[in-house]
Amino acid sequence: MGVSGRVLVLGGTGEARRLAAALVADGVDVASSLAGRVTAPVLPAGEVRVGGFGGVDGLAAWLDARAVRAVVDATHPFAATMTASAAAATGAVGIPLLRLHRPGWVAQADDDWRWVDGLGEAADAVQGFGSVFLTTGRQGLGAFAGLTAHCLVRSVDPPSPPLPARTTIVLARGPFTVADELELLRRHAVEVVVTKDSGGAMTAAKLTAARELGLPVVLVRRPPLPPGVPTVATVDEALAWVHDAVGPRRA
Ligand code: NAP
């Protein structure tokens, strides 16, 4: 038998899509939510809604109106506002929340990784380099606008100004292979790579490529998680949690 009761997955990540697919396959009534930042997003299985909820109150009202019984926050590790809203709104409505948070990347012995606490610090950390690969995503690139280095920017949709004066834009969506990344780094004579500590396999090839070329990598540390929210690292753990929260797995 399938389980009744709606589960909301806050998405925008590969993990969220995999979780939604597994829940649909198990007969769970699931809705996925996307922010609507990307023009042509890869859609999860099952019902999908797109766009902000209107802050904590808007999300709480949505959860209440849809009789949502459990929420999995599977947003990107840097989607801190949505993660905080999910904690506050589920607390207000009195339903369980799980954070699905993929592990951050771990340096290997010879890696030259330079940790910073935000995009502004990342911009400071690349002063003096002649060619910089900015893979921090389309949002927040204004922090690098003052750079005089050549900047290679890769994003899914075109970034908006302000951008560094000498910018080359590459529009692409992961996953990327190490061979792709080596070719890109060599072609643009990249001297330093800037990335968020997004974690996961989809975009890790740039770290391997930087390692092979002996390039330094500036990594932006993750924002902290809201306290008191149970957290898992994998889709399988999240799936088990949902079944515990809303009912048995379909026979
Ligand atoms: P954010 O700063 O935490 O969220 C800003 C606002 O966008 C939220 O307050 C919410 O609006 C809306 N929002 C965010 N995620 C949403 C979702 N899944 N469903 C409905 N509304 C959502 O988020 P962000 O960093 O802009 O990320 C936006 C989306 O892109 C997320 O879904 C995230 O998983 C994905 N993403 C982010 C990054 C990144 O580097 N930040 C990278 C890859 C993918 P209201 O307050 O109106 O509800």
Image (tube, helix red, strand yellow):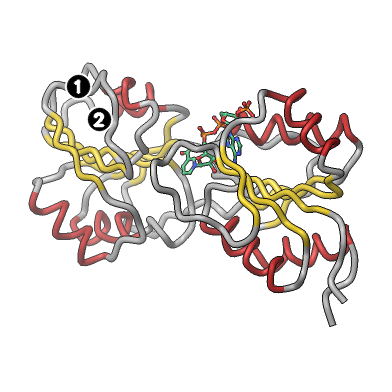
Which residue appears at 26% of the width and 43% of the height? 154
Q: Quadrant of ligand 1?
A: top right
From the viewer's perspective, tell me whether residue 170 is left or right of residue 62. Answer: left
Which residue appears at 77% of the width and 70% of the height? 27
From the viewer's perspective, tell me whether residue 225 is left or right of residue 78. Answer: right
> In which quarter of the view is residue 181 placed?
bottom left
Q: Quadrant of the N terminus?
A: bottom right
Secondary-structure class at tag 2: loop
Residue at numbered disc 2: 126
From the viewer's perspective, tell me whether residue 85 is left or right of residue 228. Answer: left
Residue at numbered disc 1: 147
Q: Amino acid at mark 2?
A: Val
How far from the left and from the top, in percent, is residue 176?
30, 61
Depicted 91 relative to depicted 107: above or below: above
How far from the left and from the top, in percent, is residue 214?
21, 54
Depicted 11 relative to depicted 177: above or below: above
Q: Is the C-beta separation of discs 1 and 2 under 8 Å? A: yes
